[in-house]
Image (cartoon, grey):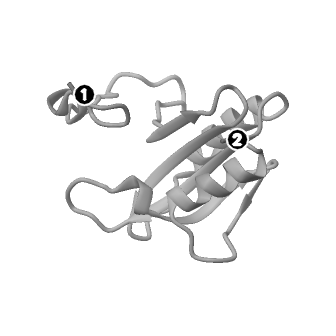
Amino acid sequence: MAERGEIHSEFRARQLPIYKGLKWGKITPTDIDVGIDFGNRLFVFVELKYGNTKVPMGQRLFLERVCAACQPRVPTCCLVATHSSNGDIDVKSALVVEYWHNYRWVEPSTVCTVSEAIDKLREKYEIS
């Protein structure tokens, strides 16, 4: 049995969702790569992109709107992180290139990994 934080079924994790046929006008599905709930005291979402790939406008709007909907009640942050892996992605080590917090997108002032960014947020909101 997998430990917490590990994939329970590698076979299931590698299945690709097919979104074909799910379209309403210009609206199509998107995904969020990582979602973390720190006991309803902090929500963190992470979107991973390969290399210099940008977040498409529709996905960016979705992430902003989900975060804004949570924000009045629970501090919420969305990290966009980059990786260069052609295999499995070490999420904790991916580099944060921008983040949405307090209703705006910000570029980090220093190089920061996903793990470091989450630790900074936990410290800011006094979450052990």
* Residue in the foreground of this view, choosing between 4 and 90: 4
Label at residue 8: 1
Q: Amino acid at mark 1?
A: His
Q: Which residue is mark 2?
A: 127
Which x, y percent locates residue 105?
Answer: 72, 58
Which x, y percent locates residue 80?
Answer: 54, 56
For the point 47% across and 40% down, the residue is 34
Furthest-left residue in this view: 11
Does the CB distance between marks 2 and 1 fall below 8 Å?
no
Residue 103 lies left or right of residue 9; in this view the side is right
Q: Quadrant of the C terminus?
A: top right
Q: Is 61 placed above or below 73 here?
A: below
Per the image, label 2 sits on a secondary structure element best described as loop
Residue 52 lies left or right of residue 36; in this view the side is left
For the point 65% across and 26% down, the residue is 39
Residue 113 lies left or right of residue 66; in this view the side is left
Which x, y percent locates residue 11?
Answer: 14, 30
